Image (cartoon, grey):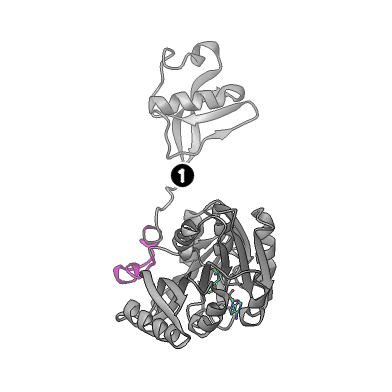
Amino acid sequence: MSEISLAVVAKKHNAETIRRKLASLGILRTSMKVFSDDECVYFPVNRLPNPDELPELRTGDAMIQEAIFNKLTPKPKSLKEAMNSILNEELIKLVPRSFDIIGNVAILELDERLRPFAKDIASALKLIHKHVDTVLLKAGPSIGEYRTRPYEVLAGSGNTLTEHREHGCRYRLDVRKVFFTPRLSGERLRVASQVKPNECVADMFAGVGPFSITIARIQPSCKVYAFEINPMAYKFLEENIKLNKVEGKITAIFGDVRQNYGILEKKADRLIMNLPFSAEKYIDVATKIAKPSGAIVHFYCAAEDRNAVESAKINISSILLSLGYDAKFLWAKELKEVAPRKAVVALDIAISLR
Ligand SMILES: C[S@@+](CC[C@H](N)C(=O)[O-])C[C@H]1O[C@@H](n2cnc3c(N)ncnc32)[C@H](O)[C@@H]1O
């Protein structure tokens, strides 16, 4: 769609200065697309500026004329707004308000009733978030030892190798091949902020390294041991350690933490156990890694959503008790609903040998 409008035609060398003046006079028409030819830039305006307002009209660096401009379609602010003209009232309610963006990959989770419109929603998402290349649809839960998830490509190139930025750190990863969630960003900062100088930290299920690297960047005097069993996640972990210039502060260990914890040169002051569906099975390993006189464990577990925090506390303290350890719960929070009637609970636990 195009329209005729009054235009201020600026010589290219002065165009940016003139654009700023027109914008500050409030006469630039933002609903039309500025264009240029070899010598001049054409700005659509809603009234004539006078030469006192725009002295370039006197010097010949700017002229007034009419020109044909392409109209800009306003960018929708949300997926709901973008889909408003396509979906009925009932379906609009189901369009998600939020979704994960990892680097330039966006991940949608859609109600089955929106399935026929999934590609339209993905295109709308790309329109709103111009830096997003690939849009994926969750096609199942995170599964297996590596906690990876099946996805369907809805839009874009389908490339899932990306770089994500968080708290000033950079993470290279392939969304399809490793576990990563931006939803734990707040947790990573919360945990890293508690680490004291010279601590020994064990990140028992490190993934591509977001807890370990945030800690090493915030508290460079500490020593972090990062264990990871997925070869692809381990490869990215090593790469990310270099990318974030924390070599020497983090030792990455490939393989099962149960088989490899003996590598620690001293007992850990702090442990991170971010493996929500099986972390309990590794509490015995944690007690072997932790300083017997006292250590802090940042523990993540899945629990029934009714009284999730309380049931997690009872379960963990009974496991620790059976291993001869006392548990003091310092902090607890239900993070999110992960499956029907399931929630992930985050717990900070002070443990010590009885
Ligand atoms: C839920 S992910 C968390 C990753 C990371 N902490 C994060 O926040 O992105 C758990 C990770 O632990 C790894 N893992 C699972 N079992 C393991 C084991 N026995 N030893 C070491 N790593 C393990 C998985 O491959 C996965 O990358």
Based on the picture, tell me whether residue 94 belongs to the magenta stretch.
yes
- The boundaries of the magenta stretch are 81-96
- Three-letter amino acid code of the residue under disc 1: Leu
Quadrant of the rendered structure where residue 263 is? bottom right
Q: Is residue 342 above or below residue 49?
A: below
Based on the picture, tell me whether residue 177 belongs to the magenta stretch.
no
Q: Residue at x 51, y 78 (%)?
A: 139
Is residue 31 visible in the rendered structure shown here? Answer: yes
Q: Residue furthest bottom?
A: 322
Quarter holding the C terminus is bottom left
Q: Which residue is mark 1?
A: 72
**Quick one: 45 or 6, which is closer to the camera?**
45
Q: Residue at x 42, y 12 (%)?
A: 52
Is residue 334 visible in the rendered structure shown here? Answer: no
Q: Residue at x 57, y 69 (%)?
A: 202
Where residue 86 sits: x, y (%)?
39, 65
Q: Is residue 32 above or below residue 319?
A: above
Mark 1 lies within 8 Å of ligand 1 (Cβ measured)? no
Where residue 119 sits: x, y (%)?
50, 68
Q: Is residue 25 above or below residue 283?
A: above
Where residue 58 sits: x, y (%)?
50, 11
Where residue 23 sits: x, y (%)?
43, 29
Tag 1's secondary structure?
A: loop
